[in-house]
Every structure is written in structure tokens, then in C-alpha cells.
């Protein structure tokens, strides 16, 4: 089974110049954890995930978070959230994200997701975004293919 058989098309997208706030509103209203970022030619420029919105609030790598000398005030850190929402998407997005082709096997896409702990990845053909595939899409595709095979066997 190929990615094109299970991927979602007509995907919600963002532009690099959009505000993070506008994209978070879209994510919350569509129950979506990540939005591909495209340029004017629908070429994939990056992806913004809920994680990308939250990361600017955290201490930098190497900072001490949980020791008595360098402890952080996590309640105070939360006050930075409104500032993050005013940024442009291009400031927080992941550039050059991992992608798959519509003609890749679904288990290859699932393998990439498993290695990187991603729940979804963009599907790109000749540089243009053509959809998204999630681990749920792959699971549904495999499940219904198995159900169909069982029904065919039962008929004979």
C-alpha cells in the first residue's frame, strides 16, 4: 500500500509571514497538531507544530532546570506565551522537514515517523505539498485492507 492511498489532501497550510497566533487558532479549531508552511508556489518551506510553539518558552539546552541553585520559575516562564504568539511562523517553524512521496510504501513512512517520534509528516511531489500522512492514516489503511482481505476469504 502506498502513501497516496491513505494520505489526507486539501491540507490546512500556513505562510511564513502568518502570525503564530493565527496558526494556533487554526490548529485548535481543526484539532490539528502540525501545519505545513508553504510559499506562494505551494512549495513546502517548513512545518509548524504545537511543539514549535511551546519550545520558545523553555530554558535553552544545557540550562539547569531542576536544581536548587539554578531553578526556574515555570509560572513566570508561562508569561512569555503571549510574546511567542506575536512572532511570525517562519521564526519558530521547522525548516526542511522530513517528507515522503505519494509513491512511498506506507510502512516506510511509518518507519520514519517511528524513528523521529512524529505523528504526521508532509507528502511532497516535485517539491510541492500534496498532502499529509499521519500514523492514524496508516493504521486505518492497514486495518481496512486487512478487513477487506478477510471478507474476500470468507466469500470463497
Image: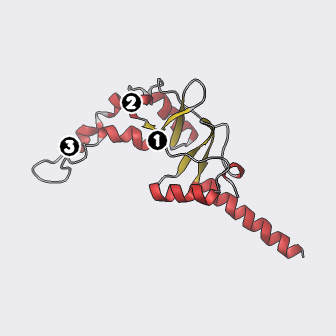
Q: Nearer the viewer, mark 2 or mark 1?
A: 2
Residue at the extreme left? 69
Looking at the image, which residue is at 67% across and 40% down?
A: 9
Residues packed near mark 2 inside 10 Å, few (<14), some (14 to 19) or many (20 plus): some
Task: Depth check: give the residue in front, 152 or 46.
Answer: 46
Location of residue 46 with respect to 3 vertically, above or below: above
Colour scheme employed for the rendering of this structure:
secondary structure
Q: On the image, numbered disc 3 is attached to which residue? A: 73
Horizontally, residue 54 falls left or right of residue 154, namely left
Q: Position of residue 36 (x, y in %)?
A: 54, 37
Crowding at dot 3, Cα within 10 Å, few <14 / some 14-19 / many 20+, comes out as: few
Distance in Å between CA atoms under marks 2 and 1: 13 Å
| Front position in the image: 118 or 87 | 118
Q: Residue 142, how many percent across, how many down?
A: 68, 62
Label 2: which residue?
Answer: 91
Marks 1 and 3 sit apart, C-alpha to C-alpha, by: 25 Å
- Pointer 1: what residue? 49
In depth, the one of 51 and 118 nearer the eye is 118
The kind of secondary structure element at disc 2 is helix
Amino acid at each position: 500500500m502506498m502513501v497516496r492511498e491513505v494520505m489526507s489532501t486539501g491540507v490546512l497550510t500556513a505562510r511564513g509571514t502568518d502570525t503564530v497566533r493565527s496558526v494556533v487558532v487554526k490548529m485548535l479549531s481543526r484539532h490539528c497538531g502540525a501545519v505545513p508552511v508553504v510559499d506562494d508556489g505551494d512549495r513546502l518551506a517548513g512545518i509548524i507544530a504545537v511543539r514549535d510553539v511551546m519550545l520558545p518558552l523553555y530554558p535553552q539546552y544545557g540550562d539547569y532546570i531542576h536544581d536548587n541553585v539554578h531553578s526556574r520559575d515555570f509560572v513566570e516562564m508561562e508569561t512569555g506565551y503571549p510574546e511567542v504568539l506575536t512572532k511570525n511562523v517562519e521564526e519558530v517553524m521547522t525548516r526542511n522537514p522530513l517528507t515522503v512521496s505519494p509513491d512511498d510504501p506506507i510502512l516506510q513512512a511509518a518507519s520514519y515517523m517511528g524513528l523521529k517520534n512524529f505523528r504526521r509528516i508532509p507528502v511532497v511531489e516535485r517539491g510541492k505539498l500534496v498532502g499529509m500522512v499521519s500514523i492514524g492514516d496508516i493504521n486505518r489503511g492497514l486495518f481496512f485492507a486487512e478487513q477487506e482481505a478477510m471478507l474476500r476469504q470468507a466469500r470463497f
